[in-house]
C-alpha cells in the first residue's frame, strides 16, 4: 500500500526474517528503466518511505520491472492480522 500510495505498482512481496533482521523484497514497476540514475533516485526515496512507515524492516530489496498492464488488487489486512497469525501457526 505504501508503494501504491507513492504512485507505483508492485508485486511479489516477500519478507524474510533472518536472525534479528526482517528483509523485505519486492518488485516495483517503474517507467524510467532506460534512465537508471532517475530510476534509482525514485526507488531510494521509496525505500526510505518503507523504512519510515515500517520500522521493523531492516533492509529492503527492490527489483525494477518494466511497467505492465496487470492490475493487482490490494486489501489492508492489518485489522485481522492476529487472526491470520493464529491460523498460520497452526499450519
Ligand atoms: Zn516482477
Image: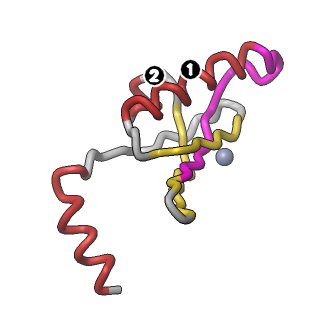
Residue at x 71% of width, y 32% of height: 66
> Which quadrant of the structure image shows residue 91?
bottom left
Mark 2 or mark 1: name the one nearer the start of the chain. Answer: 2
The part of the chain drawn in magenta is: 23-37
Q: Is residue 74 left or right of residue 78?
A: right
Q: Which mark is residue 45?
A: 1
Q: Residues within 10 Å of mark 2 (few under 14, many from 20)?
A: few
Q: Are marks 2 and 1 in contact (CB under 8 Å)?
A: yes
Vertical comparison of 15 with 40: above or below? below
Residue situated furthest front in the rendering: 20
Residue beneath the point at 48% across and 40% down: 71
Is disc 1 surrounded by few (<14), some (14 to 19) or many (20+) residues within 10 Å? Answer: few
Side of 79 where 72 appears, left or right: right
Mark 2 and mark 1: Cα distance apart in space: 10 Å
Q: Which residue is mark 2?
A: 6
Query: Which residue: 41% across, 32% down?
Result: 2
Instruction: Tell whether circle 2 marks a residue whose Cβ is less than 8 angstroms from ligand 1.
Output: no
Q: Quadrant of the N terminus?
A: top left
Which of 2/75 is in front? 2
Residue 25: % across, % down = 59, 49
> Was residue 28 drawn as part of the magenta stretch in this picture?
yes
Residue 52, compared with residue 15, is above or below; it is above
The answer to which of 8 and 72 lies nearer the viewer is: 8
Camera-near label (2 vs 1) is 1
Q: Secondary structure at mark 1?
A: helix
Q: Is residue 61 magenta?
A: no
Amino acid at each position: 500500500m505504501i508503494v501504491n500510495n507513492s504512485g507505483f505498482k508492485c508485486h511479489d512481496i516477500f519478507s524474510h526474517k533472518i536472525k534479528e533482521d526482517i528483509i523485505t523484497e519486492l518488485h516495483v514497476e517503474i517507467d524510467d528503466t532506460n534512465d537508471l540514475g532517475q530510476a534509482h533516485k525514485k526507488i531510494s526515496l521509496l525505500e526510505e518511505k518503507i523504512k519510515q512507515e515500517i520500522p521493523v524492516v531492516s533492509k529492503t530489496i527492490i527489483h525494477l520491472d518494466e511497467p505492465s498492464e496487470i492490475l493487482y488488487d490490494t486489501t489492508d489486512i492489518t485489522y485481522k492480522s492476529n487472526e491470520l497469525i493464529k491460523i498460520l501457526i497452526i499450519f
